[in-house]
Amino acid sequence: MSSLLTLRNTAVTTDTGGQLLQNVNLAVEPGQIISVIGPNGAGKSTLIRVMAGLQKTTLGEVETRSSLRIGYVPQKLVAPATLPITTQAFMQLHNRHGATSDLPLATLGIESLLNKPLLALSGGEMRRVLLARALIRKPQLLLLDEPTAGVDLIGQVEFYQLLGKIRDETGCAIVIVSHDLHFVMAATDRVLCLDQGLVCCHGAPEEVSHHPEYQALFGAGTEKAFAVFSHAMDGHQHVHVHAHPHGSDHIDAGESVHG
């Protein structure tokens, strides 16, 4: 198969009959950056967990390229108080083959954190550490669930610039869930918009931003800001916009190899 991962008519149903995902179809190609957007409760985190192999499906198929390497960054990792390890020790957990990313730790801003206790990391520091850990195994597919929640505006710009660098230097595909609509849509190749577990629209950012379903969810006129954010993504960071990050659910970290 040419695609790294393909979902066909995928559905996830709760034990009580609730529909978390319904009839989702998606193909992820090498080198793509795909944004998954939608309101709270739309099924975005469930979709990422399905792709990571951490969530069983009720219906449909999940097909992956043989021996696909997946890196996964959850919304949040709550380290147990009984886990008094350093950041460096945490980075080495489950790294059985001693693989290291070609990206220097300084690029990810965690070089100075390696000897720091994991429990002492701030939210932003933990997100950078989780990203670095996901990159250790040189994934072909990188899955990110709300990686910039709580990060300030300049930090968001720098993060999405970093994602572009990761994609360009490694060739991996990236699927990212985020509420930061303007940043994500300025830095992405394709957008998938979910609402109540259903894909309500998908395609190139410019197409999705004019779609009636998108505008019904997020408001008309947001497409006018894309040029401003695209300008910021090119390295001009003097953008005066107030971001509104939302809360996130508590899920566990993990990585998967399918095949």
Image (cartoon, grey):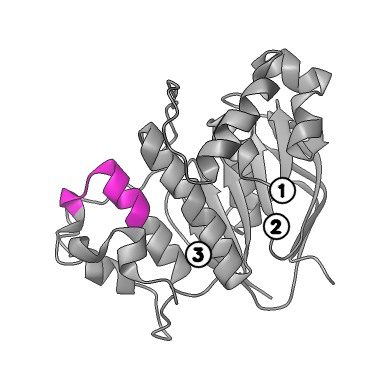
Magenta-drawn segment: 119-129
Q: Is residue 163 left or right of residue 99?
A: right
Q: Dot 2: few (<14), some (14–19), or many (≥20) neighbours within 10 Å?
A: some
Q: What amino acid is at disc 2? A: Gln
User: Count the marks: how many?
Assistant: 3
Task: Give the residue number, with chain letter if any, for mark 2.
Answer: 32
Q: What distance separates the C-alpha of mark 2 from that of mark 1?
A: 6 Å
Image location of residue 128, percent across then percent down: 35, 54
Of helix, strand and loop, which mostly describes the magenta segment?
Answer: helix
User: Residue at coordinates 15% horizontally, 58% vertically from top-left?
Assistant: 117
Measured along the vertical axis of the image, is residue 122 above or below residue 64? Answer: above
Measured along the vertical axis of the image, is residue 95 above or below residue 226? Answer: below
Res 22 label: none
Res 189 label: 1
User: Residue at coordinates 61% horizontally, 59% vertically from top-left?
Assistant: 53
Regarding mark 3 in the picture, which secondary structure is present there?
A: loop
Q: What amino acid is at disc 3? A: Glu
Task: Give the residue number, with chain letter if any, for mark 3.
Answer: 255
The answer to whether mark 2 and mark 1 are in CB contact below 8 A is yes
Q: Which one is nearer the viewer's eye here, 56 or 253?
A: 253
Image location of residue 145, percent across then percent down: 51, 45
Of marks 1 and 3, which one's residue comes earlier in the chain? Answer: 1
Of marks 3 and 2, which one's residue comes earlier in the chain? Answer: 2
- State which quarter of the image contains the N terminus: bottom right
Of marks 2 and 1, which one's residue comes earlier in the chain? Answer: 2
In the rendered image, is residue 37 in sight? yes
Q: Which one is nearer the viewer's eye here, 78 or 75?
A: 75
Regarding mark 1 in the picture, which secondary structure is present there?
A: loop
Image location of residue 229, percent across then percent down: 56, 33
Q: Nearer the viewer, mark 3 or mark 2?
A: 2
